[in-house]
Image (spheres, grey):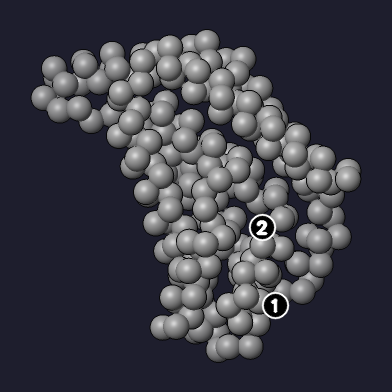
């Protein structure tokens, strides 16, 4: 049980939803509500699970391959992050989905008497999940952060299979706590944003994405 708690603490301390996927999740929550942002977070959670498992179960071949090819992997990841940032500024900042959502919500309220957001298709959520996973998995720095976190908490992979599995499960629990909290807060605030404010938010998020990508490139080159 102690390994489960350690995993939760590792995720809560080292898994704060900042960076490219965190920004993307906020953007999607503002546009389409809680579930869009949360599914985005799930893509990051899967990447966390993969990297954490590689570290704790000692899959040396995989970790050495990732570390050996970290530069091209990170460059691809940077390009995707910057592209998302440009997309937010060039497209979404002009045509905010917020006004469309409000009109849709008003229609739904009249038809159903509630304020639930319009349902999305499985394909939409799959694309949402997959795009976030790609952005997260193309950041090999994650595997280094898990190595550091595990060393701090005294986890070296020498425990039993059950202990190691509980640790990974704890990381999932901690990550879900973060994503649920962030997406709930943003989804509550989204209805209070005016069209002008939401446009400013999208531009700011786009700039943040570009800066994150540029910062990653700078760290690779220097």
The 10 Å Cα crowd at callout 1, few under 14, some 14 to 19, many 20 or more, is some
Question: Quick one: label 1 or label 2, which is nearer the N terminus?
Answer: 1
Question: Height in image: 209 above or below 111?
Answer: below
Q: Position of residue 200 (x, y in %)?
A: 50, 18
Q: Say whether marks 1 and 2 touch (CB < 8 Å).
A: no
For the residues labelled 1 and 2, the Cα–Cα distance comes to 15 Å
The 10 Å Cα crowd at callout 2, few under 14, some 14 to 19, many 20 or more, is some
The residue under label 2 is 142
- State which quadrant residue 108 falls in: top left
Q: Position of residue 127 (x, y in %)?
A: 52, 37
Q: Residue at x 49, y 38 (%)?
A: 25
Q: Position of residue 1 (x, y in %)?
A: 41, 83
Q: Residue at x 82, y 40 (%)?
A: 218
Image quadrant in which the C terminus is located: top right
Q: Residue at x 13, y 17 (%)?
A: 110
Q: Residue furthest right?
A: 221
Q: Residue at x 57, y 15 (%)?
A: 91
The count of marks equals: 2
Query: Residue 58 shows which numbered tag?
Result: 1
Check disc 2 and report its element: helix, strand or loop: helix
Question: Height in image: 56 above or below 50?
Answer: below
Q: Is residue 10 left or right of residue 78?
A: left
Q: Which label lies toward us, 1 or 2?
A: 2
Question: Height in image: 63 above or below 190?
Answer: below
Check disc 1 and report its element: helix, strand or loop: loop
Q: Position of residue 23 (x, y in %)?
A: 54, 37
In this view, the residue in front, 12 or 64, is 12
Q: Is residue 148 visible?
A: yes
Q: Is residue 89 left or right of residue 123?
A: right
């Amino acid at each position: 049980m102690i390994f489960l708690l350690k995993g939760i603490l590792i995720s809560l301390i080292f898994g704060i939803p900042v960076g490219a996927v965190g920004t993307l999740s906020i953007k999607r929550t503002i546009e389409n509500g809680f579930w869009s942002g949360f599914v985005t977070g799930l893509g990051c959670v899967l990447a966390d699970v993969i990297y954490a498992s590689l570290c704790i179960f000692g899959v040396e071949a995989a970790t050495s391959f990732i570390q050996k090819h970290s530069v091209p992997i990170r460059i691809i990841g940077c390009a995707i992050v910057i592209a998302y940032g440009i997309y937010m500024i060039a497209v979404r900042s002009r045509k905010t989905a917020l006004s469309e959502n409000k009109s849709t919500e008003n229609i739904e309220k009249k038809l159903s008497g509630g304020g639930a957001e319009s349902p999305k298709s499985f394909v939409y959520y799959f694309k949402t999940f997959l795009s976030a996973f790609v952005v997260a998995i193309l950041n090999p720095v994650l595997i280094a952060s898990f190595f550091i976190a595990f060393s701090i908490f005294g986890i070296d992979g020498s425990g039993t299979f059950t202990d190691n599995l509980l640790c990974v499960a704890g990381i999932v629990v901690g990550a879900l706590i973060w994503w649920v909290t962030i997406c709930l807060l943003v989804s509550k605030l989204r209805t209070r944003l005016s069209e002008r404010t939401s446009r400013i938010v999208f531009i700011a998020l786009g700039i943040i994405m570009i800066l994150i990508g540029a910062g990653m490139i700078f760290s690779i080159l220097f």
